[in-house]
Image (tube, helix red, strand yellow):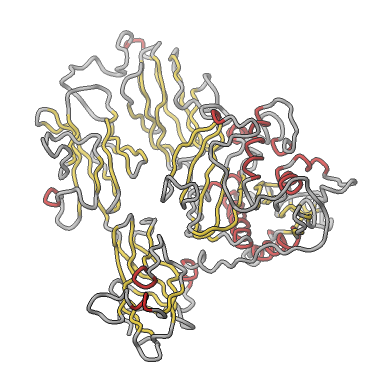
Amino acid sequence: MIRRALILGSLLAVVAVLFSAILTISGITTSGSDATFGSTIPGGPVLAPLTTMGGDGDSSRSLIVSSERIDPDAEDSPGRTHEVFFPNTDHELHVYHIRGREPGSTMLIIGGIHGDEPGGYLAADLYADLSLRRGNLIVVARANIQSIHHNTRGASGDLNRRFGGYDDGQIDQEIAVVLEDLISESDVLLNLHDGSGFYSPENEGSRRNPRLWGQSVIIDADGFTMPEGQRCDLLSTAESAVARVNGLIIDSDHHFKVKNTLTFDENSTHREQRGSATFYAVSEVGIPGFGVETSQDIDRESLRVEYQVLVINAFLDEFGIVPDHPRFALETPALRYIAISIDGGPSMIIENGGSLNVAPGSSVEITHIEANYERGITVDFEGKGGFNDLGRTFRLEGDTRVRVNKDKYPCGSVLLVADASLAGVRGSPNVAPKETSRVSIEAFRIALNGRWTWLRPEETLRVLWGDELILDDPIAPATGSYKINFRGFVGNQNNNDGEDRGYTIFTAHDLLQRFSLSPETERYEIRAELGGTIFARSFVEIVVPRLEYVLIQPEDGPILALTEGDTIDIGPTSSLKVIDVVTIPRDSDPVTVDLRRLTGSGGTDDRGETIQLGSELLKDHDLPGHDGLYEITVRRKGLQIGRVMVRFDAPGGGQQ
C-alpha cells in the first residue's frame, strides 16, 4: 500500500530530475587504424597529486584554495578541490578537480584557451560546481584569463599552438605545460571554442563551407591506435554525440557536424593543429580529444553557451560520467560592493556606483569584491597595476576609477576621490578622527560552511539547518571595544560574556530557540554592542530542509514518488531501486540516501542500488517490532531530514 504516493509516469518534471540518473554508459567503440601516438595511455582515471605543477615539478607555482572532499585525507574521496597556478599574477590558472561517488572515466574540460570565444569559457564555468555520481571532471574554465579580460585571441600569441614541445619563452608556454599535465591525468579531453561561420563539408556560400569552424565537433583523425593495441574510433564517438545534440536543437541551421582536420596526414591543410591541445592528447598521451566549436555568427552568447552545454552533456553520456545536478543558468554580471582598506586600516564597503573621499597619498588596497559571480571577477585601478589589482596596494595620487569586470563584461565601478581637505587624516576617509569609544559597522563578516560572506546591518542571511557559522571581525571604519553577540548562542560556556567571535556555531544543535525572534521560524539576531548599547544588528534565518519525495522504482513497475512517511509494499521476492531524491529547498545538497537497514552496506549514498530481500542479513535489518518493515532515510550533513518505508511482505508484490 502506498499512502499519498504519486505515480509520475512520463511527467516532464520527473524527466528533468532523472536526467542524470538515466545516462547510459556507451564507451568508445574501436575500429580502423588511422594514427598512432608515442606514449602510453594512463592506466585508469587517477588524478595525480595536486602538487604536480608541470615538467619541472615546481610546486611553488600553485596554491590549493579549497578542498571539499567527503574525506579530506583520502585523495580519491568524492568532492571538489580548487587549485590555483601562478597565483597573484595576470595569468592565474584556476583548476577544479571534481570526483564522483563512483569510479569512472576522467574528463578534462578546457575553456578560454582563446580569450575572444566566450561561448567556451562561459559553458565550462558551469561545470566547476557540478557534483558527480560517477566518474571525474577536471575543469579549466579560463585557460587564458588575461586574453579573456582583453577579449583577444591571445595576449602573447596563440596558446592553442604551444602544445607538444613548442617553446618561445612566453608565459603561454608555462600555461601549456600545466595543461599538458592535466591532459595526462585524464581519459578524454574537450576543448571548447567559438568558431567562424558554419562548417559544412559542402560549399554552401561564404558563411557555410568546409573552411569554416562554427557548429562543429573537431577531430584530428577518424581514429588512432593505442599503445596497448586498442584502436579508438574518434569519428564514431563524435558522430554519436552530435546525433544526440542535433536531436535537441530545433533550428536545423544550427545543427552540429563532425569536422576531421586530418592533422596526422602529410598533406593536411591544417598542419597548424599539430600544436593544439587535442592533437597533443591524441598523439602524445593517447586519449581521445575533441574540439567543440559554436558559431560566432550566432549573435546571442547565451544560445552559444546552451549549445556548448548540450555537447558537453552528450560527451559525458558517451564516457559514462553521470552528473548529480546538471544546471544551466546565465545571469547578467553585477557588482554589489567593493571592500577597500585605507592605510592598512579595517576594510570599508563602497556600493556599486558609489564614491569615497580619501586623503591624497593614502595607501589603498581592494580586499574583497562582492558580485553575483565568484569566478572570472577582476578589479582594475585605472592607470595603475595590471588588469587584476585585487590585493595590490597603490598610492592614491588623484581621482581614480576602480572598475570591476566579469571576464570581458563590465560589472560596475566605484570612484576614489582625492580630497585635499582630508590631508593628515590617514585611514579615515570622509570623517574626522573618532573617539575610540565610538564605533560603527559597515558589515558583519561570517564564514558559512567555510566560505566567507558579508552581511550589512539589517540584512538577513538565510542558512540551512545543519550549516556551520563562524563570526569574525566585522568590516568597520573605526575600532572600539565592542562585542559581536549571536543572540541564542553561548560561545564561552564558562563565562557567557556575549562575545561570540571565533566560535563555530552548529545551527542544528547550538542555538537556544527561546531567543528566536519568531515563533514560526528560527530567526536570530547578530548584535554589535558597546556598553549595553546596540549600534548595529543583522539577522540569521534558519531554513529546515525537508524531503519532498523519494523516487523509487519497484521491479518492472512505474517510478513512484514517495513523500515523507509513505510506505510501499512489495512482494518478498521482488526488488526495488532508489532512483533519486528531491528536497525543499532544492539547494539543500549534498544529501544522502541511506539504505543500510536494507543492505547492511554502510555506504555513503545508496542511490542506484537494487534492493532485494534475499538473505538473513537483510531480514535482520528491519525496524524493531515491525517485521518486514524497512527504513529509507534521507540525510544532509549527517542529519535526518526525512524518511520513507518499504515492506517486503505483500504476497506477489504490487502497489495500491
- Pick whichever, 347 or 3, lies toward us: 3
Q: Residue 230 falls in which quadrant of the image?
A: bottom right
Seen at 37% across and 69% down, the residue is 600
Q: Quadrant of residue 617?
A: bottom left
Q: Nearer the viewer, residue 450 or 295?
A: 450
Report whether 463 appears left or right of 494: right
In the picture, which quadrant includes the C terminus?
Answer: bottom left
Horizontal and vertical percent position of residue 253: 70, 60
Residue 13 visible (yes or no)? yes
Image spot of residue 473 (x, y percent): 27, 30
In this image, 195 relative to 626: left or right? right
The residue that appears at 52% across and 44% down in the rendered structure is 96
Quadrant placement of the N terminus: bottom left
Work out which residue is located at the far front of the displayed protein and give it.
616
Q: Is residue 162 above or below residue 239?
A: above
Q: Position of residue 521 (x, y in %)?
A: 20, 55
Is 514 or 103 nearer to us in this picture? 103
Q: Is residue 48 above or below residue 474?
A: below
